[in-house]
Image (cartoon, rainbow, N blue to C red):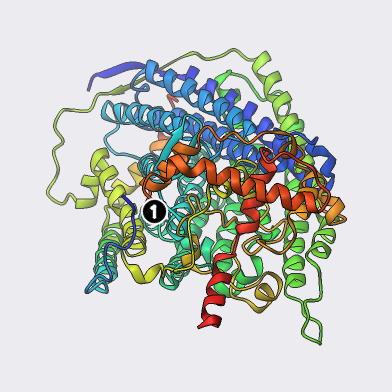
Amino acid sequence: MKFINYLESITGIGIYPLVSLMIFFMFFALVTLYVIKADKSYINKVKNIPVSNELQ
Amino acid sequence: MELEKFRYDNKIVKMFAYATILWSLVGMLAGLLAALQLVLPALNFDLPYTSFGRVRPIHTNAIIFAFVGNGIFMGVYYSMQRLLKARMFSDMLSKIHFWGWQLIIVLAALTLVLGYTTGKEYAELEWPIDILITLVWVVFGWNMFGTILRRRERHLYVAIWFYIATFVTVAMLHIVNSIEIPVSLTKSYSWYAGVQDALVQWWYGHNAVAFFLTTPYLGLMYYFLPKAANRPVFSYRLSIIHFWALIFIYIWAGPHHLLYTATPDWAQSLGVVFSIMLLAPSWGGMINGLLTLRGAWDRVRDSVVLKFLVVAVTAYGMATFEGPMLSLKNVNAISHFTDWTIAHVHVGALGWNGFLTFGILYWLIPRLFQTKLYSDKLANMHFWIGTLGIVVYAVPLYWAGFMQSSMWKDFTPEGQLKWQFMDTVTKMMPFYIARAIGGTLYLIGAIVMTYNLIKTVKIGNFLEVEEAEAPALSGEYHSHSKDHWHRWIERKPVQLMVLSLIVVAIGGIIEFVPAFLVKSNIPTISSVKPYTPLELEGRDIYVREGCYVCHSQMIRPFRSETARYGEYSKAGEFVYDHPFQWGSKRTGPDLARIGGKYPDSWHYNHMLDPTSMSPNSIMPPYSWLLDDDLNTSLLRGKIKAMKTLGVPYPEGYEDKAIDDLNKQAEEITTNLKKDGIETASSKEIIALIAYLQRMGKDIKAENKEVANK
C-alpha cells in the first residue's frame, strides 16, 4: 500500500529525461515550424474570431 | 448557407459575475482580518474559529477558489459561447455547476472555521468536499465539451485551448494530491508521507497557481483584451507557441518551492531549470497581450477597462519575471519563509487576477444590462485606489522580507547570532501596518466597484435573451491537401485535451517515479520511530489549528539555521508524517527541533498566553486547548489508518493504543504538577505538548547511539 522503496534503483534511469527531452524538443521544433509556415489568411481568420462577429 | 438561430445564455454569466463580486469582498475581508491580526493579536478574539491559523486558509481558499474560481467561470461561460457560436450545452449542467460550486465554497468556509483541514496548503478541504469538487468539475467539463461538440465555428480559438488545458490539468492535480485515507467524515490522512507528500503537494500547489490562476486567465486575456481594444491579438502564431510551451514547462517547476529542503537534490535542480525556462513563455504571453494595443495606446487613456487590463498584464509580467528569479537557489535562500513570498503572490493575485477580473466586470456588466457604466469617474477612482493599494501592499513586504532574512542570517563578529527571532518579528510591525493599509485601499476600491456595478444593474435592462445566428458546421470536414497536422488538433477538442494531458503528465511522472520508488532518494534513519498515540493526537491538533501557517518544520542546511534551530532536517525524519508539515512561511520560528528545548510547563503557559513566555509575541492564545477534553474516539481508526499507510505499529496495536496514550498523558500531567500547574491529563493541551516535545528528538537519539558506539 505504501508508495515507498519498491526498487533499490532503476537501471538506465538516465534514458527517461533524455527521451522526454527529445520528445519535446521535436514537438516544439514541429510547432515552431508549423507556426512559421502557417498560411497567413488562415491565421488571420482564426485570429479575428473574437472580434469579427458583430452579432455579439 | 442556411443560418441557424440560437440564443446565448447570459443568465449563467450574470450569476457567476454576482458570485465573483460577492466572494471577492468576503475573501478580501478575511485577508484584511488576517493582516490586522499580525499587528493586533487581540483580533484573534481568543476563539478557535477566528484564530489566524484558521483565518488565513479561509482567506487563501476564498480568494483562489471562490473569487478567482467564479471569475473564471463567468469569463469562460461568456466567451466560450461566443467563440464557438453556440449556447452552453445544457442549462441544467450550468445550474448544477453554479450551485455546486457555491455549495463547495460554503462548505469550505464552514469546515475551515471549525478546524477540519487536511493541513496541505490550498488543498485544506477534507475528503467529502474533495469528492464534491471532483463531481462539480466533471459537470463543468461535460458542459464545456458538450458545447464544443455542438459548435458552429470549426476552429477552436486559442482561449478555448487554455480552458481545455485548465480543465484537464486541474482535474489531474486535484485527484492526485487529494488521495487520502478517511478516518471519519471530517478527518483523513494524506496517503503520502514526508518528502513524497511535500513533492506532491508543491507539484499541486505550484500548478494550482499555473492552471487555476494563470491558464484560464490567459484564456480570458486572449478573449477580453482583443474585445475591449476592438482589435485582434498581436500575434496568433505566438499564442500557439505560448500555449504549448507554457503548459509543458509549468508542470515541472513545483520543486522550486522546496529548495534547500530535505527533498532530493536532482528534483530541486529540475525545478530550478524549468522555472528559468518558464520566463520565456510567460513573457511571450505578456508581450502578446501588451502589443495587442500597439498603435492604440491612446485608447487606454479613455477606457477604464483597458486600464485595468493593461495593469493586470503588466503585473503578470512582473510576477512571472520575479518567479524565476525567486527560483534561483541563491535568491531563494534569502526569500524563502519570509514575507517576500507574500508580496510576490499578491502582485499576482491583486494585480493579475484581481485587475483582470475587475476589467472584465466593467466591460461585461454594462453589456449584459444594455446600458453604460453608471459612473466612469468611480471606476477610474477604483483603478487608481486599487493600483495604489497594490503598491502600498507589496513594497513594504518586499522590504520586510529582505530585512527579516538578513536579520536571521546576521552574526556578530564573535560568531553568535545577532538577533533573537523575536527581534525580527518586532521589526516587522511597521511593514505589517503598511500592508494592512494597502489591503484596505484595495478593498475600498472593490467596494466602490460593487456600488458602481449595482447602480449600473439598476439603471440597465438585463439582456436575458440574446439572439444570434450562424451557419451550422457541415458534417464532414474536407481537408485540403496542404492541411497541416496541427490544424487537425485545432479542430479536435478531445485530441487537444488528450495531448494536453500527456504534456502535463510527463513532468509529474518524471518527478514522482524516482522519488517514490527509488530507495536512495529517502534515506531511512533507524532511530526515527512512529508517533506514540498521544503524539499522534497532538499532531492532529497542530494540523487542526493551522500551526503550519506560521511555523515551518524544515531546517535548511545553512549556518544561520543550524545555529538557531539545531541540526538541519533530513529526509528520513519525515517518513511517518502524514501529512508533512514543513510549512512555507516563518512568521514564528521553525519548530523542527522544538522537542526538549523548553519544559512542559513552558508550553502550557505559552499556549495560554504567548506573551507571558515570550514578550512581544504576536501568536494568538490557544486557551481552549487547556479547557477542552481530548476526543480519543477516533484513535483506533487513526492507528489502523496509519498501519494501512505503512507505519510500523505492532500487530493489534490499535486496541492497546489508548492505554499507552493515558500513560503518557499521566507523565506529562505529573511533570506539569512539579512546576505548579494542576490540570487533568485528559485535556487537549497534554497531547499537543506531547507532540511538540517529540519533534526533532529522534535524530538526537541517533547521535547518542553513534556516540555510545
Locate residue B289, reporting x and y percent: 51, 50
Q: Using the image, determine if residue B228 lies above or below residue B329.
A: above
From this viewpoint, is residue B178 visible?
A: no
Q: Quadrant of residue B323?
A: bottom right
Q: Amino acid at mark 1?
A: Ile
Residue B608 in the image: x percent, y percent? 80, 44
Q: Is residue B435 left or right of residue B247?
A: right
Observer-nearest of B499 and B359: B499
Q: Secondary structure at mark 1?
A: helix
Residue appearing at x 73%, y 46% in the figure: B387
Residue B203 percent across, percent down from the top left: 44, 54
The image quarter in which residue B175 lies:
top left
In the image, is residue B6 above or below residue B506?
Answer: above
Residue at screen point 71% across, 19% down? B455
- Residue under the image location 79 percent in, 40 percent down: B440
User: How many residues crowd around disc 1 within 10 Å: few (fewer than 14), some, or many (20 or more)?
Assistant: many
**Residue B635 visible in the snapshot:** yes
User: Residue B392: x, y in percent?
Assistant: 78, 51
Which residue does the numbered mark 1 point to in the structure image?
B247
Vertical arrangement, residue B547 with respect to residue B357, above or below:
below
For the residue pair B51 and B459, the one nearer the viewer reads as B51
Q: Is residue B332 above or below residue A4?
A: below
On the picture, is B452 further left or further right than B92? right
